Amino acid sequence: MKISVPAKLILKDGTEYAGKNFGADISAAGEVVFATGMTGYPEALTDPSFRGQILVFTYPLIGNYGVPKKEFWESDRIQVSGLIVCDYSQSPSHHESVMTLAEWFKKEKLPLVEIKDTRDITEKLRKQGAMLGKIISSGKSVKYDDPNKRNLVAEVSTKKIITAGKGKKTVALIDCGMKKNIERSLLARGVQVMTVPWDTDVTKLPVDAVVISNGPGDPTKAKKTIDNVRKVLDGKIPALGICLGNQILALAAGGTTYKMKFGHRSQNQPVVELGADKCFLTTQNHGFAVKRAPKGFREWFKNANDGTNEGIMHDTLPFMSVQFHPESTPGPTDTDWIFDYFLERAGLRKRMRAQTGNEKKEI
């Protein structure tokens, strides 16, 4: 049995990179993006925000600790269309590993390609922006495919309503491609979580607050979600948006969004809380951002690197959103307090404690 087969990555501008495919002998197409995280590849690969994308990891050694049980994933499958790494580790070592990365990709029928010059790929994407590309395995050609033309949210969202927890207060979690740790973070705070499909009108359900999850692609494609979140705002139901949810909440309230050059996909993005003189390290995974905050909202956070929007908050009502991932996984837990702050503002918790570094204080 062959360990690998010849493969190459071809970018839309004609640039080619030769390599070896350790995953399924299948060709694939999508939007080529890069992520700079040093650890946490199982969580990143199962993040639905990567749907339709060929992911390039900038950290050179990938696969060295294998793949953990499904309970540690952020969804029930690998979400990327293909993976590019510099150095694939064929002999992982970790007490929680149940299979190798190559076995996982073969099982899910996806290509895992080792290309030594991932640095050059990354530099090209930084200079020219994220672009379409395709992985050709064993010479099997495929056409380029732009995932941002599809409603990716509908592809990754749950198909039914799922309720978890026994709290007295219920939070509706609109699944636009949510990471599992959002649900875990809410459950840990003693509320009941009702996860609903992306096109659900939650104003017709017995809920006390709403969380709009992260997800893939162009937020303007999720028109039903935007319309339903507008009903949430009109009904003055407390709402928190996360990542794509930040963009959807902004659009529902009258703001605008745009496609970024190459996006933010890392575990060390610095964001500044405006008016508080605080900076947090955050996990992020998005290619779109809020361009103009809606009327009645103020900018809550901004990116310390490029100044892009990282969150908005209503002037008087409990409506807020963040572009980063407060639930982390993988990444730092600096902004885990966002969940406490939202539940306190929503009237679902009497007290909230925020933590910055080693300092804890009452809010």
Image (spheres, rainbow, N blue to C red):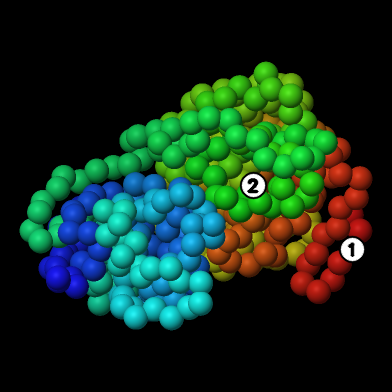
Residue 122 visible in the shown view: no
Observer-nearest of 275 and 26: 26
For mark 2, does the 10 Å Cα neighbourhood hold few (<14), some (14 to 19), or many (20 or more) residues? many
Residue 186 in sight from this viewpoint: yes
Is 287 displayed left or right of 14 in the figure?
right
- Judged left or right of residue 258, residue 228 is right
Q: How many marks?
A: 2
- Helix, strand or loop at label 1? It is strand
Q: In the rendered image of this protein, does residue 107 appear above or below residue 294?
A: below
Q: Is residue 128 above or below residue 343?
A: below
Residue to which mark 2 is pinned: 183
Alpha-carbon neighbours of circle 1 within 10 Å: few (<14), some, or many (≥20)?
Answer: few
Q: Quadrant of residue 248?
A: top right
Q: Residue 186 versus residue 251: which sits nearer the camera?
A: 186
Residue at 64% over, 56% down: 327
Residue shown at 79%/46% (left/top)? 190
Percent across and percent down for residue 101 are 35, 68
Q: What is the spatial separation of the Cα atoms under label 1 and label 2, in whole angstroms?
A: 25 Å
Of the numbered discs 1 and 2, the one sitting upstream in the chain is 2
Image position of 29 with respect to 121: above or below:
above
What x and y, as percent, mark residue 337?
A: 76, 56
Amino acid at dot 1: Lys
Quarter the N terminus occupies = bottom left
Q: Position of residue 85 (x, y in %)?
A: 32, 70
Going by the numbered disc 2, the residue's amino acid type is Glu
Question: Is residue 209 toward the left or the right of residue 218 in the image?
Answer: right
- Can you identify the residue that label 1 sits on? 361
